[in-house]
Image (cartoon, grey):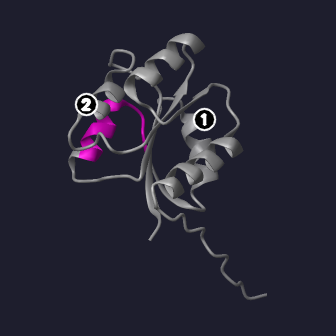
Amino acid sequence: MKQQILIVDDSKPISYLLQTILRKKFQVITAPDGYAAMRWLSKKNFPALIIASPRLPEMQNWEMIEHLRSSGIYGDIPVIVLSGLDKQETAGKCAELGVEAYYMKPFNPVDLEKNICNLLSLQGRSVEEETPRLQAV
């Protein structure tokens, strides 16, 4: 069974891009805002990794990521931030919150995928790539 990755970003193009790139190796769940993500998590879902924007609709900047990091339940889930905010602010806040990695928008999705695989393998979680299916010709 594929590991789950939760993507929390209000940008439909970014969510779609990430879903398209990552779905070969992971089960990808997307949430358009922090509230939808927290509802999904509250249903006893524990993804292998969360990719999130620090700026989400109807929330203060960083609010969802701060909640995840301070949570006794979700605090150990690796988080990667995709930010369109100021680079110095992003770097400082990510260091303060113990975020595993951050990327500034625009970002290279291939590098992000490699980083996800590296992070999960460092945690002892294997990443299984979907095996191609034979098709009748």
Quadrant housing the N terminus: bottom left
Mark 2 and mark 1: span between their CA atoms?
Answer: 29 Å
- Badge 1 marks a residue whose secondary structure is helix
The residue range painted magenta reads: 30-41
Residue toward you, 103 or 120: 120
Q: Is residue 54 visible?
A: no
Vertical position of residue 101 compared to residue 60: above or below: below
Query: Is residue 61 left or right of 19 when viewed as pictured?
Result: left
**Residue 52: image location, x then y, percent:** 46, 33
Q: Is residue 109 visible?
A: yes
User: Magenta segment: does it hold 116?
Assistant: no
**Residue 116: image location, x then y, percent:** 56, 48
- Badge 2 marks a residue whose secondary structure is helix
Q: Residues within 10 Å of mark 1 (few under 14, many from 20)?
A: few
List the residue tagged with mark 2.
70
Q: Main secondary structure of the magenta part?
A: helix
Residue at the image point whose x is 46% and y is 24% from the top:
94
Residue at the image point whose x is 41% and y is 53% from the top:
48
Type of residue at label 1? Pro
Query: Is residue 46 left or right of 122 when viewed as pictured?
Result: left
The label on residue 13 is 1
Residue found at the far bottom of this picture: 136
Residue found at the far right of this picture: 137
**Residue 136: image location, x then y, percent:** 73, 88
